Amino acid sequence: MIRCLFEAGLFASIGIWSIFDGLRLSATRREGVFDWLGPDRYIILIGGILVVLAVARLLTSRGEWRTSAAGHPPADISPRESMLSMRGALLTLAFAGYALLVSYLGYALTTTAFFAAVYWIMGLRTPLSFILAVVLSTAAFVVLFVTLADLPLPRGELGLPF
């Protein structure tokens, strides 16, 4: 039950934050010509989806609530399941950190930190492969979204070029 509340609360808080951030962008970033979806509407859309998922998580977990209220002990969890659950929670926190920091640190820096966190959480520890994976993933995302999609992404407080 606590896990369900944590997940739903995390989805809802990131979703609400994204909606407000998208509204902030739409009020301040309408100088140029954007596509109909634009960066502001895209963030609002993603935020709305996260809020809907939070509500869905609460509604689909009624069985967990009944079991918890009945006082039945939780089923035994294997160490592997526990590790996977912890890894999932850490990945969710990394995504939340990314969503919260991208407006302030800029797209390139936040994306680099996000990939570093994800690869570390997933167990990529060899220095050369870790650095290569982070650099290549960041470069691929920059090429995809900045160059090919021509999206105006947040530069952050540092004013980095992308």
Image (cartoon, helix red, strand yellow):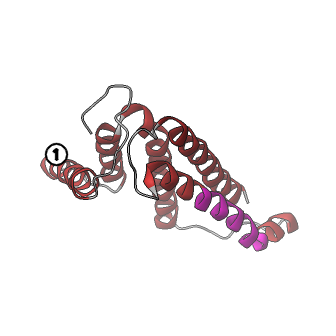
> Which residue occupies the foreground of this view, 74 or 144?
144
Residue at 32% of width from left, 45% of height from top?
A: 111
> Which residue occupies the foreground of this view, 102 or 86?
102
Question: Which image quadrant is residue 58 in?
Answer: bottom right
Please provide the residue range marked out in magenta.
48-63
Rendered location of residue 7, percent (x, y): 63, 56
Rendered location of residue 3, percent (x, y): 66, 57
Q: Residue furthest top?
A: 158
Residue at 78% of width from left, 71% of height from top?
A: 62
Q: Residue furthest right?
A: 70
> Which residue occupies the foreground of this view, 142 or 6?
142
Q: Classify residue 121 as left or right of residue 149.
A: right
Characterize the magenta stretch by its predominant secondary structure.
helix
Residue at 21% of width from left, 52% of height from top?
A: 147
Identify the image quadrant of the C terminus: top left
Rendered location of residue 23, percent (x, y): 58, 43
Q: Classify residue 147 as left or right of residue 68.
A: left
Mark 1, Cα crowd under 10 Å, few <14 / some 14-19 / many 20+, is few
Does residue 51 belong to the magenta stretch?
A: yes
Identify the image quadrant of the N terminus: bottom right
> Which residue occupies the foreground of this view, 12 or 4?
12
Q: Classify residue 12 as left or right of residue 115.
A: right
Local secondary structure at mark 1? helix
Does residue 145 belong to the magenta stretch?
A: no
Q: Dot 1 corresponds to which residue?
A: 127
Please say if 53 is above or below 22.
below
Q: Residue furthest left?
A: 128
Q: Amino acid at mark 1?
A: Pro
- Total numbered badges shown on the rendered structure: 1
Rendered location of residue 73, percent (x, y): 75, 66
Residue at 65% of width from left, 52% of height from top?
A: 12
